[in-house]
Image (tube, rainbow, N blue to C red):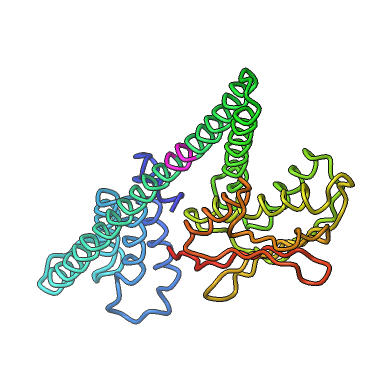
Amino acid sequence: MDLRRRIRDNAFARYGLAIALAAFAVLLRFGLNAVFPPGFPYVTFFPAIVVAVYLGGMGPGVLCATLSGGAAWYFFIPPFMGFSFDMTVLVALAFYAFVVAVDIFFIDGMRKALDQLEDERARLRDLAESRDLLYRELHHRVSNNLQVAGALLRLQGQGITDADARHALSQAGERIEVIARIQRELHNRTGEPVPFRVFAEALLASAAAAAGARVRLTIDGGEQPLHPDQATPVTLVMLESFNNALEHGFGEAGEGEVRVVLDQSGLTHLLTVANDGASPPPGFDPAQSKSLGLRIVRAMAQQLGGKFEMAREGDWTVCRLSYAPKRD
């Protein structure tokens, strides 16, 4: 396709190719003259005309057909080495002209259709590149704006004397900054969604480092990207469960093991975050807890139309989120 386009854009190349193809067809016909029986003067010229039309267009095709017809008439139609005008010759020339006209008409139409298709593909590629560029820019701006909003809330909280209000603003700012970080990690540099496991590792490692905790982290499953409408709530549930383990499970020691599993194999996806830290206090009910983190988890589970559970199983505190995945 690139060769045809380069020839199409150069008039000298188009018509030079037509002349070269006609000359080659003449030489080939001379070379095969002993093989062909009488009555086949045009057999090597038709392919040359087809190639000339396909690569160069109608004008070069007509030129190649004219040169080929004249050469066939002069060299290969009796009496040879001359132009005769009897009825047999005129019928043969009329047949040649008809076949050539049909070939040129259809092949030139096909060539134009291919050119239009290639131009349309190029236009769509440009549109796709522009769309991806705009998407990445929008994604970047949203993440930055969220981060700025979180920082402003935390800054505002520093000027408030009421301890509860200051703590609430600080927590709100932290959550907004978490959402901004999620937005940045959900997609790669080309704007394509990344598998859950990839960005989960980065987010949890960052959260552990920020808390100064020594966490042995294991992540299984999550080989597929999350649906865009579900990515933020699912990730927030994971982060809140992880932070709960750091704050309440590991306590001042700040050391323990966390296992994260996302099973995407069934009709219901299951996110599990388990830690080997201290167990919740006796009678603890996550559904009734006033903790901001657990309230966020319950809200995210409700948004997903799913279910969140938290229980002690042996030496592990296990948080589970089950939800039905969306399909595009």
* Quadrant housing the C terminus: bottom left
Asked if residue 132 is among those painted magenta in the image, a careful observer would answer: yes
Above or below for 317 versus 189: below
In the displayed structure, does residue 228 sit left or right of residue 202? left
Residue 178 image point, x, y percent: 62, 40
| Residue at left offset 54%, top offset 28% | 149
Above or below for 211 versus 282: above
Corner quadrant of residue 220: bottom right
| Residue at left offset 63%, top offset 59% | 286
Most foreground residue, 257 or 135: 257
Residue 54 image point, x, y percent: 34, 57
Residue 4 image point, x, y percent: 41, 51
Most foreground residue, 94 or 223: 223
Residue stretch rendered in magenta on the structure: 130-135
Most foreground residue, 58 or 214: 214
* Residue lying at the far top of the rendered structure: 159
In the displayed structure, does residue 318 sit left or right of residue 251? left
Above or below for 265 versus 319: below
Q: How many marks?
A: 0
Residue 226 image point, x, y percent: 55, 58
Q: Main secondary structure of the magenta part?
A: helix
| Residue at left offset 58%, top offset 60% | 287
| Residue at left offset 77%, top offset 71% | 313
* Residue lying at the far front of the rendered structure: 283
* Quadrant housing the N terminus: bottom left
Asked if residue 38 is among those painted magenta in the image, a careful observer would answer: no
